[in-house]
Structure formats: C-alpha cells, structure tokens
Image (spheres, grey):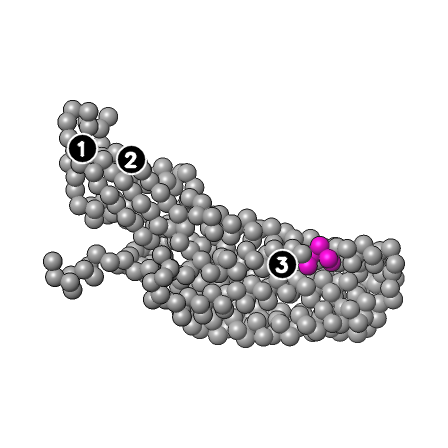
C-alpha cells in the first residue's frame, strides 16, 4: 500500500475547539472580574460586611471558571498535535473544573463558619463604603455581561446549557463534515456569560442587604447573605463535581444512547453487536469501539455510516468478525 493513502483512514483527534476571539473576550472579562473580586474581598474584611465578602468569593468561583477556560484554550492549542495524548488533551478543562470545585467548596465552608461567628459576635458595618463597593461590583458585572453577550449572540444566539448534562442525546443540530462538526457552540463563552449574570444577581442581593441594614437597622441581613453566598458556591461546586467526575472516570454515555447505537447496527438483521464501549474524550465528545459478529462481513466504513446520525460520536473504531456455520444465524 502507498504510504500517502494512509491519511484516508486516519482520524482527527482535535476534540478541543479553539475560538480565538472568544479567548480574547474571556481574558478581558477575567481581568475585570479578578480586580473587582480582590476589591470586594478586601473591602468586605475592612468594612465588616459578610454580604460584600460573599459577593467577592462568589466572583472567585467565576474567576476560577474563566481561568480554566483560558488555560484549557491555551493548553489545547499548544498540545493540539501532541501524540502523547490518546485522544488529544481536551479533558484538561474538565480536570481544572473538578479541582477548582473542590477548592471553592472549602472556601464556602470557611464562609459559613465566619457567618456563624458574625451572628454570635456582630461587628459594626461601615455601610456607606460597603454599598459603594457593591455598586461598583454590579457595574463591572454588567459591563462584562455586555462584552460576552455581544460575542455570544453573534456566535450563536440560541446556545444550549452552559455545561451539557452528562450523556444527553442532543444530536447538536449539525452534521459531520469529514469527521468534524461543521460548527460548534462555544460552551466556555456561554458558561462565562451565565457566570457573570449570576454575579450581577449576588451584587444586587448584597446592595439590598446593605441598604436594608443602613436604613432599617437589619444588620442580621448582611450575615444572612454570607450564608446565601456560601450556599450558592457549594451548589455550584457540587454541580461541577457531578458533571466533571463522570468524564474523568470515562463513564459511558447514557444507556438509551448505547441501546440506540446497537439497534442502528443490528437493524438489518445481518449482524450482532458482541461488544460496545462508548466513553468521553472531552466534555461533549465520545469515542466508541464496536465489535460485530456477522456471516456476511462488510467494510468498517459501511457500519460507521450506519452510525452517522449519532452526532456525539466523534471517533468510531469497528471490528468485524466473520462467523461461519449453522450456529451463526442471527436470530
């Protein structure tokens, strides 16, 4: 066989979609959010406001999310053609998400302890300064949302959820193009946009708590915001752990999807699936190994074409075994 023909049977292993403009926008938002986060955490400590502190730490969850997005972009781009990874380094973002969710869950637990202490031993809050900082935080959030929304809408106004639930069959509304998706929803950008909107909401809550404390003397409301912020972070961390662990553990796609794959292959009654493995190679891309037994073997490409409608399968390996004799008739 001529060597140059080998490329006809080689797969692309680029499961990390690279979006340079999205990366630039995310960097700007990261810088803005990071600066505001530092100001809010320092001001929260200085002015004795748990609401401000909670808002700052809530921002930290999103700073971490942006940093992971940028790190994943960079790492995937640098190692795009690195053959030391079996299926590209696309899981790096998933690993970062898992690690940061553990770290931020710890922060949330410390915040809960602080809030309990604040309830037992209240401190005098400097309301005017705290309200001003919270308002600046809200403005920065809205500016970041505009930066991301402008690009997000231009990119895909109808984007799916920020993080795909594990193993859903969405068929992605796009077709395979030489084994690649013809276009891709940028989940990093969508996630960043939703993070910023969640931040704006906690900034509003902080302002409400501080204003109520200043004018109505409801100082306890500031401490309550500490509990609310910690709970929001814990829920975020739990959701991220639940979403990233199955990908890191190579958990298979849901059973309905694998059953549908098996049905599509066995539909013509000529072959039986003897072994089927489907596992994630990135957050939303799957590889599959299919072992078939048949009396009338066809080429692997024939069986791959039968699976053309399964948009989440990016890398399919087919093994066809010929079975002779009476015992091999498909039932």
Q: Examine the residues drawn in magenta and state their main secondary structure.
A: helix
Q: Residue lying furthest left in this view?
A: 1
Q: Are marks 3 and 2 in contact (CB under 8 Å)?
A: no
Residue in the image at 55% along x and 48% along y: 242
Neighbours of disc 3 within 10 Å: few (<14), some (14-19), many (20+) = few
Tell me: 312 left or right of 140.
Answer: left
Residue in the image at 80% along x and 72% along y: 46
CA separation, marks 2 and 1? 12 Å
Residue 300 on the magenta span: no
Tell me: 22 left or right of 310.
Answer: right
The x, y position of residue 89, in whole percent, is 41, 61
Q: Find disc 1 in the rendering and name its residue.
A: 323
Neighbours of disc 2 within 10 Å: few (<14), some (14-19), many (20+) = few
Q: Find disc 2 in the rendering and name its residue.
A: 274
Q: Residue lying furthest top in this view?
A: 326
Magenta residues, as a range? 107-111
Q: Secondary structure at mark 3?
A: helix
Q: Nearer the viewer, residue 146 or 78?
A: 78
Tell me: 11 left or right of 104.
Answer: left
Image quadrant in which you'd find residue 37 = bottom right
Residue in the image at 37% along x and 53% along y: 173
- Do we see residue 225 in this rendering? no
Q: Secondary structure at mark 2?
A: strand
The x, y position of residue 47, in whole percent, is 81, 70
Tell me: 29 left or right of 324.
Answer: right
Q: Find disc 3 in the rendering and name its residue.
A: 103
- Do we see residue 188 in this rendering? yes
Q: Nearer the viewer, residue 154 or 224?
A: 224
Image quadrant in which you'd find residue 271 = top left
Image quarter hosting the N terminus: bottom left
Q: Nearer the viewer, residue 232 or 244?
A: 244
The x, y position of residue 123, in whole percent, is 87, 64
């Amino acid at each position: 066989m001529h060597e140059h023909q080998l490329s006809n049977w080689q797969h692309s292993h680029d499961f990390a979609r690279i979006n340079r403009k999205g990366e630039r926008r995310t960097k700007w938002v990261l810088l803005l959010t990071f600066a505001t986060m530092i100001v809010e955490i320092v001001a929260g400590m200085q002015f004795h406001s748990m609401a401000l502190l909670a808002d700052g730490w809530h921002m930290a969850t999103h700073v971490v999310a942006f940093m992971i997005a940028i790190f994943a972009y960079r790492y995937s781009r640098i190692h795009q053609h690195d053959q030391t990874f079996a299926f590209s380094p696309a899981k790096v973002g998933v690993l970062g998400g898992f690690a940061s969710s553990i770290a931020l869950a710890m922060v949330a637990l410390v915040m809960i302890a602080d809030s309990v202490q604040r309830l037992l031993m209240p401190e005098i809050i400097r309301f005017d300064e705290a309200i001003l900082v919270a308002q600046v935080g809200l403005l920065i959030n809205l500016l970041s949302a505009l930066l991301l929304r402008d690009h997000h809408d231009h990119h895909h106004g109808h984007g799916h959820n920020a993080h795909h639930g594990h193993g859903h069959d969405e068929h992605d509304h796009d077709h395979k193009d030489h084994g690649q998706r013809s276009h891709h929803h940028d989940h990093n950008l969508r996630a960043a946009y939703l993070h910023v909107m969640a931040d704006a909401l906690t900034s509003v809550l902080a302002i409400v708590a501080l204003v109520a404390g200043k004018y109505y003397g409801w100082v306890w409301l500031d401490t309550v915001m500490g509990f609310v912020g910690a709970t929001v972070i814990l829920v975020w961390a739990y959701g991220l752990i639940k979403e990233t662990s199955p990908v890191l553990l190579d958990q298979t796609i849901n059973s309905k999807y694998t059953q549908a794959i098996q049905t599509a292959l066995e539909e013509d009654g000529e072959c039986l699936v003897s072994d089927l493995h489907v596992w994630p190679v990135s957050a939303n891309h799957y590889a599959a190994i299919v072992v078939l037994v048949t009396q009338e073997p066809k080429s692997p490409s024939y069986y791959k074409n039968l699976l053309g409608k399964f948009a989440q399968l990016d890398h399919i390996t087919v093994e066809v075994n010929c079975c002779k004799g009476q015992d091999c008739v498909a039932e």
